[in-house]
Image (spheres, coloured by chain):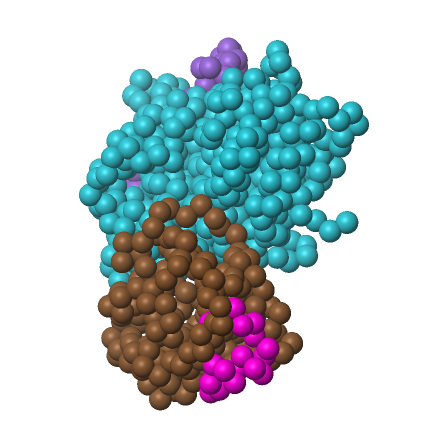
Chain colours: A purple, B brown, C cyan
């Protein structure tokens, strides 16, 4: 992270986060990450709902797409998937 | 009457008899009559039957005193069970010479004065407020009845303002009954004047 | 308080709690979440009656504790609502965690604290141990002298809170104010409504989250913002300094709101933070808070008739503490007495004394400062004891070894 540290005069009020976690590739250290078999996916959205890191992007109709830069590989999506469409594969 | 502009009143009764409400009605009525007034209670944890004191201050200008009243011009005892020798020091505490002792009692003022050895320098007034309250209101809440005695004794405010005050606190039939009790007490209140009236 | 002019107001007979409830009713409040506790109960009762009767359009949230009362008020205010709550004593103690959170997330909740002694032993009567205990939690604190001022302060508190983006505590003495029916001039609904207006939400820039757009500082799904997340040694210190600076920055806001209020109401509390009384040529002044001070002024008048040069100062705003003003106004007196209606266990004197003396220590002419702790658990402070304190203070400066802190009205 190269953002310079800000002094109190330049911080937004109310102690709210003002930087985005987008720049932190928190998925870099994952050992396993999800791979979706689109033929098995029934587009139920459970992986999108359960992901603790909000990694899945989903428009409500198509196959959810994980943002692997931010996936830590916990495997909750694979466990919850009712059709076993998600496989955790070694990175 | 020889009032200094500020009039201080102390009420004695027990929780549930409407001591605080009575003093609130009086303050409300005084404010509606264009005066400045206070009403406040002093009690331990609220409970029915516990001793309760309430206070009124009425003046023509804003009131700066806030604490309990130590030297009242008028003492109102709404609970007859307090009219016993052992409570007298409390009831009379600080009552000014020429002040008023208004009690809810079946006894005549002179009988009460003799029985409780009330000092000669205070005016004593009595009325059987519990009976009046039971007959007129249907409940042993003699607070508004004692306000009738107050008016009879001191003519402190025109009765219309007390009527307004009572209806503010108890709108409708309950209020009307309380007004009847107040007016009956005004008629039935009996007095035994102080021997030497010292202007207060 | 001085009344400058009379405007069309209704003279009502209200006790302090009812006066606060009336102010809330008139101030376009969206959400009230409160839990009843003596001597604050009447506030909650009246507001729920107003809601039940359809006299006010606000959401009344029934909660199971004071911790929840303030949590709900905080959440409502974060979502953009104008929120109010009220408590006393042990109820305030139970809010402790959320007091700090409300202040540090800059949430403009207004709370009436009906001052009552803290347990144990349990006591329902007035002293200032509850709000004084919360003096460092980041809330602005306005201390009221009577029911009229409790009404006025509550209305002003919404403006102050929302402009300073800090929560405000309006205190009123339990029973002495809360349960004392008195004359209260009530402003017309529309006058109060236009004075407080509708809550405006400040906007902030969060470039790396929302780009160049300024987004509202509130919980809003359209522009997500997180309040109160983890903040360690990297930014916590900066956030605290910023919060402290916000407290300082509230001083001119508090003054301006008071002046604007004086214009609509005719009631002026100049010079806002503390009000001197007959101090111009005084040798000794007695400083204190709240309802006690009207009686102190009466005693000042009596002593002045005896030729004694005494005066009184009533502190109205304890947070932010007006240290500069204390130095400016009090450093010229030979002796300053400070009344405290609470103890700070183990400290040298009560909280008001400690801060007043601390402020005066950096003045060039240091007055002698003495402390009187009085009135704990509702013990009355009768005029004769106030007189005794003044007479002692008139002699005190020449007395070497005189104790700095004394109790007034306690049995030895």
Relative to C399, say whether B176 is above or below.
Answer: below
- Foreground pick, C264 / C31: C264
Residue B109 belongs to the span the image colors magenta: yes
Q: Position of residue B192 (x, y in %)?
A: 45, 78
Q: Position of residue C342 (x, y in %)?
A: 63, 42
Residue drawn at point x = 42 percent, y = 78 percent: B191
For residue C235, say whether it is visible.
no
Residue drawn at point x = 62 percent, y = 44 percent: C385
- Foreground pick, C251 / C213: C251
Relative to B73, say whether B189 is above or below.
Answer: below
Residue A37 is drawn in which quadrant? top left
Q: Is residue C7 left or right of residue C278?
A: left
Residue drawn at point x = 29 percent, y = 46 percent: C185
Q: Is residue C83 left or right of residue C143?
A: left
- Foreground pick, A17 / C113: C113
Report the magenta residues as a range: B104-123
For residue C379, say whether it is visible.
yes
Q: Is residue A32 left or right of residue C140?
A: right
């Amino acid at each position: 992270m190269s953002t310079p540290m800000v002094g109190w005069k330049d911080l937004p009020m109310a102690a709210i986060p003002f930087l985005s976690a987008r720049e932190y590739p928190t998925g870099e250290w994952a050992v396993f990450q999800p791979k979706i078999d689109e033929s098995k996916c029934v587009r139920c959205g459970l992986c999108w709902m359960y992901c603790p890191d909000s990694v899945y992007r989903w428009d409500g109709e198509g196959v959810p797409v994980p943002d692997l830069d931010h996936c830590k590989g916990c495997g909750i999506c694979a466990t919850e998937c009712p059709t076993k469409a998600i496989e955790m594969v070694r990175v | 009457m020889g009032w200094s502009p500020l009039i201080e009143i102390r009420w004695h009764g027990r929780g549930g008899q409407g001591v605080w409400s009575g003093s609130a009605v009086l303050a409300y009525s005084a404010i509606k009559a264009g005066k400045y007034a206070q009403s406040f209670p002093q009690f331990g944890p609220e409970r029915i039957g516990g001793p309760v004191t309430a206070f009124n201050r009425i003046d023509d200008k804003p009131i700066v005193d806030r604490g309990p009243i130590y030297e009242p011009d008028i003492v109102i005892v709404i609970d007859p069970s307090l009219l016993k020798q052992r409570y007298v020091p409390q009831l009379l505490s600080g009552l000014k010479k020429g002040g008023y002792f208004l009690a809810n009692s079946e006894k005549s003022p002179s009988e009460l004065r003799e029985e409780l050895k009330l000092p000669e320098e205070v005016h004593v007034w009595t009325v059987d407020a519990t009976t009046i309250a039971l007959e007129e209101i249907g409940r042993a809440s003699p607070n508004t009845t004692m306000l009738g005695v107050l008016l009879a004794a001191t003519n402190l405010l025109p009765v219309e303002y007390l009527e307004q005050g009572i209806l503010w606190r108890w709108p409708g039939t309950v209020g009307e009954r309380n007004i009847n009790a107040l007016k009956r007490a005004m008629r039935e209140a009996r007095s035994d004047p102080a021997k030497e009236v010292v202007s207060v | 308080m001085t009344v400058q002019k009379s405007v069309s107001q209704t003279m009502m007979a209200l006790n302090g709690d009812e006066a606060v409830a009336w102010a809330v009713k008139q101030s376009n409040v969206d959400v009230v979440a409160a839990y009843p506790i003596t001597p604050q109960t009447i506030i909650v009762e009246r507001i729920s009656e107003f809601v039940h009767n359809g006299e006010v359009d606000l959401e009344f949230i029934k909660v199971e504790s004071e911790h929840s009362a303030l949590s709900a008020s905080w959440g409502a205010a974060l979502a953009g609502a104008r929120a109010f709550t009220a408590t006393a004593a042990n109820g305030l103690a139970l809010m402790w965690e959320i007091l700090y959170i409300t202040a540090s997330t800059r949430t403009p909740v207004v709370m009436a604290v009906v001052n009552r002694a803290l347990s144990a032993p349990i006591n329902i009567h007035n002293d200032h141990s509850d709000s004084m205990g919360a003096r460092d939690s980041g809330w602005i604190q306005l201390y009221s002298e009577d029911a009229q001022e409790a009404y006025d302060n509550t209305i002003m508190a919404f403006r102050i809170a929302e402009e300073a983006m800090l929560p405000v505590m309006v205190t009123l003495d339990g029973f002495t104010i809360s349960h004392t029916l008195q004359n209260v001039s009530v402003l017309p609904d529309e006058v109060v409504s236009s004075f407080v207006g509708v809550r405006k939400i400040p906007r902030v820039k969060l470039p790396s989250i929302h780009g160049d757009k300024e987004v509202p500082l509130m919980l809003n799904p359209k522009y997500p913002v997180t309040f109160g997340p983890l903040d360690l040694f990297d930014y916590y210190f900066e956030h605290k300094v910023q919060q402290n600076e916000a407290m300082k920055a509230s001083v001119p806001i508090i003054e301006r709101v008071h002046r604007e209020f004086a214009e609509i109401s005719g009631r002026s509390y100049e010079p806002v933070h503390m009000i001197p009384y007959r101090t111009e040529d005084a040798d000794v002044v007695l400083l204190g808070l709240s309802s006690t001070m009207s009686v102190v002024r009466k005693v000042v008048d009596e002593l002045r008739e005896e030729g004694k040069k005494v005066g009184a100062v009533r502190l109205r705003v304890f947070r932010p503490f007006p240290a500069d003003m204390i130095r400016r106004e009090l450093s010229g007196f030979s002796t300053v007495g400070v009344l405290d209606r609470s103890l700070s266990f183990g400290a040298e004197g009560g909280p008001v004394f400690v801060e007043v003396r601390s402020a005066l220590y950096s003045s060039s002419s240091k007055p002698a400062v003495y402390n009187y702790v009085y009135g704990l658990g509702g013990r009355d402070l009768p005029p004769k004891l106030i007189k005794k304190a003044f007479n002692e203070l008139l002699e005190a400066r020449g007395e070497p070894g005189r104790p700095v802190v004394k109790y007034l009205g306690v049995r030895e």
